[in-house]
Image (spheres, rainbow, N blue to C red):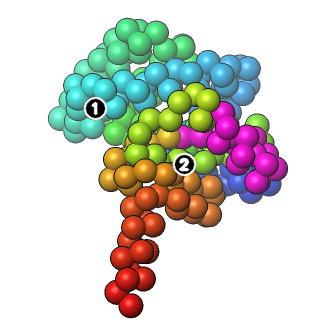
């Protein structure tokens, strides 16, 4: 396994990371990284949107055979690529489907490291437009000197502004934090 300056070593720690690393190696060998990443993205969205799918992957009472058959049907209906479908079958056989969300995140991190990208986790009070995301990515690229992929989360509790986590660096420009700081200053 190729190691990108120790970055992949940190990402692949733990069960989810080892499975993601194996999937990445297979995808790289078959020159299929983009298709696998796209399929995993579709699967992750499906897990977020479907309580039944989430229950399928996390249920310990479903037999390995039933889980494998069900996940194969899900993969077919979601039109996932063949490598991802086979990977999900292996997870079902090994009773590892419950860890698939972590594996998807680890796979995306490995791909980003492979491409020399960094990922910024951005939390906003409202969904960001494509133009806002483009501007934010350009600003972050200027700051870190590398391409930046953005993973967004919406949390109305921050009231407004953004919270950006870029590696170990946290940039909190949320209105909630500003109001809390103002309240502390008023106390004394």
Q: Is residue 7 at least partly visible in the picture?
A: yes
Q: Is residue 79 above or below residue 146?
A: above
Find disc 2 in the rendering and name its residue.
Answer: 121
Residue 184 in the figure: left or right of residue 50: right
Q: Quadrant of the N terminus?
A: top right
Question: Mark 2 against mark 1, which lies toward the viewer?
Answer: 2
Q: Which mark identifies residue 54?
A: 1
Residue depicted at x 34% and y 39%: 98
Q: Is residue 24 at least partly visible in the picture?
A: no
Q: Residue furthest front?
A: 186
The x, y position of residue 161, in whole percent, is: 49, 51
The x, y position of residue 174, in whole percent, is: 46, 58
Q: Main secondary structure of the magenta part?
A: helix
Q: Quadrant of the C terminus?
A: bottom left
Q: Which quadrant of the structure image shows residue 186?
A: bottom left
Residue depicted at x 40% and y 45%: 125
Badge 2 crowding class, 10 Å Cα cut-off, few under 14, some 14 to 19, many 20 or more, is some
Who comes first in sequence, dot 2 or dot 1? 1
Q: Nearer the viewer, residue 162 or 45?
A: 162
Mark 2, secondary structure of its residue: strand
Q: Find the magenta span and give its range.
A: 134-151
Residue depicted at x 67% and y 25%: 33
């Amino acid at each position: 396994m190729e190691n990108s300056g120790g970055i992949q070593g940190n990402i692949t720690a733990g069960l989810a990371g080892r499975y993601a690393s194996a999937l990445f190696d297979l995808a790289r060998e078959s020159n299929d990284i983009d298709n696998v990443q796209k399929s995993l993205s579709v699967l992750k969205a499906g897990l977020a949107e479907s309580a039944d799918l989430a229950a399928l992957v996390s249920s310990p009472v479903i037999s390995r055979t039933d889980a494998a058959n069900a996940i194969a049907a899900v993969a077919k209906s979601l039109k996932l690529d063949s490598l991802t479908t086979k990977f999900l079958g292996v997870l079902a056989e090994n009773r590892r489907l419950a860890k698939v969300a972590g594996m998807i995140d680890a796979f995306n991190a490995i791909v980003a490291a492979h491409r020399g990208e960094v990922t910024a986790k951005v939390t906003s009070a409202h969904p960001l437009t494509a133009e806002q995301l483009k501007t934010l990515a350009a600003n972050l690229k200027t700051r870190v000197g590398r391409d930046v992929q953005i993973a967004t989360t919406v949390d109305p509790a921050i009231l407004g502004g953004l919270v950006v986590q870029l590696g170990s660096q946290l940039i909190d420009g949320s209105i909630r934090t500003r109001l809390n700081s103002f309240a502390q200053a008023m106390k004394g």
